[in-house]
Image (cartoon, rainbow, N blue to C red):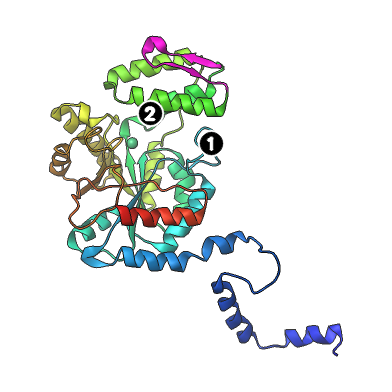
Amino acid sequence: MPSRSALTISIHELPQSPIRLSLRPIIDKGYRDTDCPPIRVKHLVNRLPYPLFRFLANRLSPAGPKARLSILIFHRVLPEIDPLFPGQATVESFDAQLDLLKSVFNVLPLPEAVSQLKAGTLPARSAAITFDDGYADNVTNALPILQKHGLHATFFIATSYLNGGRMFNDTVIESVRRSPLTRLDLNDLDLGAHELDSDVAKAKAIGKILPQVKYLPLDVREDTVAQVVTRAGVGSLPDDLMMTTSQLKTLHAAGMEIGGHTHRHPILAKLDPNTVRDEIVAGKIWLEDTLCTPVRVFAYPNGKPGSDYLPEQADIVRELGFEGAVSTQRGVSTRPSDVFQLPRFTPWDVNQTAYALRLLQNIVTG
Ligand SMILES: [Zn+2]
């Protein structure tokens, strides 16, 4: 029976390679041979299914003409969970999602993915990451995480809100969030009356007000939203939600793709063809003049075919020299897809395994 010190020495003297070789099978096995109660180890739970997910994704989305391209949408990446929108990506969840995407999918720049989709040369498990609107947190929070994982994303910018502007939806959200009232009566604006006595109530109020405001003509929408601000009884609202020109240039200099998203983010389906063209051209020219580079891809504001843009408006986007465009129609792109109406989707789940399954489900059902 060796003494304790002798035993310690003998372990230290073991050659290192058998120890290294023995580690991988234990970890890869995914379970422990023990009578102990199960120990939930976060990094094992999160990482172990990746090879299985890659295998499944390879079967569902093979390389070449039968490839199925997954295009993901993000809007904001917050420093921490927003109690009004707990599903919104945070620095932590975005980091975990990119870890999964990088491990399971081949993430391509969107313009490259579009041209390979048309040519039938996409790699297996192809995906592209996109952001809409031009939020400043895309630069401060998302960019460092994208760079950490070595991933590319495309950012669609509504140019009129840069440098201190605020989109109508954020004006409503921030007014409701900051309102000192417990009840917001907007009946005279035909927007109903809403309880504001909790975060849940505020989220519900926002969910009811926004869809009613969204489809108003642009000038009416601006006036109505200004009325909501007054009724909510809030003073100043944030003016730093969107990127500055300098931040946009930082994003572009980091190798990210910048895409068009119109100038004022209107619902294109409600506009006449000339105004549609003007909105798209104004955003494209502003970006091209600012970044000295062609703007190659476009995202329809709000993005639902039929209600937010019309199929014939895809022809305008094509005529204006874009190479592809994306909607918010849920699904996955295949070689026969119209590259000027490519579907996108937003998978979300608190659990990484369920998140991965949602990505795979989209490939199947898309
Ligand atoms: Zn948008």
The quarter holding residue 170 reads: top left
* Residue nearest the viewer, comparing 22 with 40: 40
Q: Answer with mark 1 or mark 2, whichever residue precedes in sequence.
A: 1
Q: Which amino acid lies under the numbered mark 2 shown in the image of this protein? A: Met
* Residue nearest the viewer, comparing 300 with 353: 353
The quarter holding residue 165 reads: top left
Is residue 140 found inside the magenta-colored segment of the image?
no
* Residue 131 visible, this orientation: yes
| Badge nearest the viewer, 1 or 2 | 1
Above or below, 16 against 186 in this view is below
- The numbered mark at residue 248 is none
Instruction: Describe the element under mark 1 as helix, strand or loop.
Output: loop
Above or below, 12 against 288 in this view is below
Residue 118 at x, y = what percent? 18, 58
- The numbered mark at residue 167 is 2
Q: Residue at x 26, y 21 (%)?
A: 217
Which residue lies most toward the bottom here? 1
Q: Is residue 173 left or right of residue 298?
A: right
Q: Which amino acid lies under the numbered mark 1 shown in the image of this protein? A: Asp
Quadrant location, the N terminus: bottom right
* Residue nearest the viewer, comparing 347 with 300: 347
Above or below, 70 against 64 in this view is above
Q: Residue at x 66, y 64 (%)?
A: 38
Q: Which residue is mark 1?
A: 82
Above or below, 308 against 89 in this view is above
Q: Is residue 156 left or right of residue 340?
A: right
Residue 211 at x, y = what percent? 36, 26
Q: Is mark 2 within 8 Å of ligand 1?
A: yes
* Residue nearest the viewer, comparing 169 with 287: 169
- Residue span colored magenta: 182-197
